Image: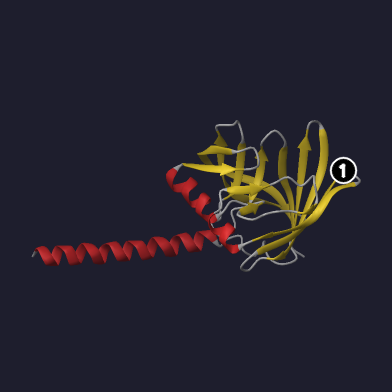
Amino acid sequence: MEKFIKKFLLTLFIILTVNCAKDFKTQSSQYSKFFKSGTTLVYEVSSWGDMYTLKVEIEKIKGDLTYKYTLSDGNVVGEGEINISKKSLENSIKIFMNFWDGGIVDTKEKTSILFSKKVFRDLVNKKEVTIDVGDGEEHLTFGNKDSYFCVVDGKEIELKCINASSDLFGYFSILDDYSFPLILKMEVGYIIELKEIITR
């Protein structure tokens, strides 16, 4: 009888684990049509009263992530190409967001414009994670699930997101998508907000 109960519980655990994984995978892929080679993300950046437009053009998204970016205030103040390794996309706590310098950027063991899958998963499940966006490590705490509105190919749409705040007074809205946890809005002394996604 004891063996039967153990076998039953093990079988039940496996079934629940597989079903949860399927549900999570299905949920995480709802925005995949937006993020592909050729997609351009348009952000508005506010820093000490100055306004900028940041354009991010995705070149490669399978395996490593590669994109070109241009930061301008009417004139180009920063431009370059970013490559993020698959390993960093999986588990890095460091996030590169300093687009002012331009040129060749060292993104070793860093992500950029998005959270790593591990950090995103831990934030949702454990409610607190450690990240570093350039000012040293900070503790980020899950706030709530929310909606974020931006324009996609000329039409305003609703994106599901999660909100989080840090012990260094930072604030983040992150796309609620495990496969591509994109930073939608970030406040860390300066503010960066996604305004438009162009897929064509």
Q: Where's the C terminus, which quadrant?
A: bottom right
Examine the rendering and report whether any part of residue 153 can be seen. no
Point out residue 47 in the picture as x, y percentages from the top left corner: 77, 35
From the viewer's perspective, is 199 left or right of 120? right
Q: How many numbered discs?
A: 1
In this view, the residue farthest toward the right is: 75
**Residue 119: x %, y % from top left:** 52, 50
Element at label 1? loop
Question: Which residue is drawn at the image coordinates 39% and 60% (left, top)?
Answer: 20
**Amino acid type of disc 1?**
Asp
For the point 50% across and 43% down, the residue is 129
Q: Could one spot residue 5 in this view of the protein?
A: yes
Q: From this viewpoint, which residue is outermost toward the left?
A: 1
Mark 1 packing: few (<14 Cα in 10 Å), some, or many (20+)?
A: few
Where is residue 71? Give x, y as percent: 82, 48
77 relative to 37, above or below: above
- Image point (54%, 58%), residue name: 90
Residue 131 in the image: x percent, y percent? Answer: 56, 43
In this figure, which residue is indicated by the disc labeled 1?
A: 73
Name the quadrant containing residue 107.
bottom right
Q: Would residue 75 be found to the left or right of residue 80 on screen?
A: right
- Residue visible at 49% across and 46% down in the picture: 123
